[in-house]
Image: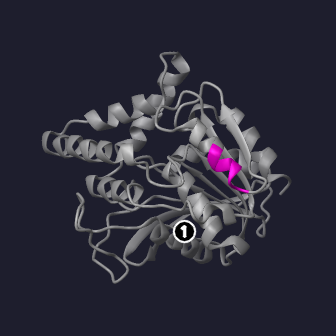
Amino acid sequence: MASTNTEVEGINYYTIYETPHNGNPTAPCILLVHALMSNLNMYDATVSALHAAGYATLRFDHVGHHNTPPPAARTTSQRRMSVGEGSLVYHMDDITRHMHQLVKERTGGARLKGVVGCSIGGVLALRYAMMFPEEVECVVSIAAPGIAAPEDKKVLWSERIKVFEEDARSGGDRLCRETVARWFPGEDRETEAVRAEALTHVRTCSLEGYKLLADTIRNYDYRAEVGGIRNRCLIAGGTEDGAISLPALKELASQIQGAKYVELEKAGHLPPMQQPEKFNKLLLDMLGSA
C-alpha cells in the first residue's frame, strides 16, 4: 500500500494508491470517492475485491476529513459566499478538478477505468464524466442526492452544522451517532457491526471539513449537462436509504444514454459497507475484465 499526501491548491490530500494482487504495474485504475463525513476506509471491502479482480485503486480523504487536514491558507481558486456557515467554499467542479489532479500525480497518467462514488461522491463521479469524458471509461454513482442540490435538504445541513458545533463545544458525538443511525437503518447484528465501524470513520471528520462539504453539497446544478454523458454509467441506490429519492435516481439514469439503474434491496446510504458482497458483484459486473 502506497499512502502519501499530495497537495492540490492548498489542500494536502491524503491518498492511497494500490496495485492489484497480481502485481501488474500497468493495471487499469479505479478512483473511489467517499461520502461526506466518512473517509476512504469505507471502501476497504471494495478495494479488496477490485485488487483480486486485477484492478489498481486510488482513494483519497476529502478536505478536512480523516487524514486530509482543512486547508492551511486561502488560494485564488477559493471563493467566499455571501451566505453560508463557512468562509471558504469549494464547488463540486473544484473538487472534481482536484480528483483529476490526484489521478495524474499518483498514477502517472490521466486515464481511469472507472470512478466510483457514494453520496456526494456519487455526484462527483458523474461530474468527472462530464468534465473529463475522454479520461474515464465507466462511472458508478451510488446514493447520489441528485443531479442538482435538493432544495428541501439545504436547511437540514444548517441544522446538522449547529449540532456539530455544539458537539465540538461539549465534547459530545450526537451528530456522529445520528448520522450513522441514518445511514444504516435496522437492528440486526450485522447492521450494528457496520454502524460501529462507520462510527470510527465519522469521528475522524473535522468540523471545518464538514462545513466545507456541506456548503459544496448545497450549491450545484448539473441538470443541463448530465444528458451529455456518454460513458458507461451505473446509478444505484438502497431501498432503505432515507437520504435519497429512488424515483429521482431512476429519472436521472433515464437522462444518461445507456445508463443502468439498480436498486439494492434493504441497503441504506452506504451499500459498499453494508452489503459488500452484493455491491462488489454489481461493481465488477459493470467494470468487466481488468
User: Dot 1: few (<14), some (14–19), or many (≥20) neighbours within 10 Å?
Assistant: many
Q: Quadrant of the N terminus?
A: bottom right
In the image, 132 versus 32, the foreground residue is 132
In the image, 188 versus 135, the foreground residue is 135
In the picture as drawn, the residue positioned furthest to the bottom comes out as 76
Give coordinates of residue 198: x percent, y percent.
Answer: 45, 37
Give coordinates of residue 67: x percent, y percent.
Answer: 40, 58
Q: Is residue 12 magenta?
A: no
Task: Please say whether residue 88 is visible from this viewpoint.
Answer: yes
Q: Which residue is mark 1?
A: 99
Give coordinates of residue 164: x percent, y percent.
Answer: 24, 44
- Residue drawn at x 48%, y 61% as measured from the top left: 221
Q: Quadrant of the C terminus?
A: bottom right
In the image, taking residue 19 as reference, residue 239 lies left or right, namely: left
Give coordinates of residue 39: x percent, y percent.
Answer: 46, 50
- Residue drawn at x 73%, y 52% as measured from the top left: 51
Classify residue 26 by image quadrant.
Answer: bottom right
Please determine whether, in this image, residue 107 is positioned above or below residue 242. Answer: below
In the image, taking residue 66 as reference, residue 268 lies left or right, namely: right
Please determine whether, in this image, residue 269 is positioned above or below residue 59. Answer: above
Residue stretch in magenta = 251-256
Which SS class for mark 1?
helix
In the image, 36 versus 21, the foreground residue is 36
- Residue drawn at x 44%, y 67% as measured from the top left: 13
What is the three-letter code of the residue carrying label 1?
Met
In the picture as drawn, the residue positioned furthest to the front comes out as 224
- Residue drawn at x 52%, y 32% as measured from the top left: 241
Q: Main secondary structure of the magenta part?
A: helix
In the image, 126 versus 23, the foreground residue is 126
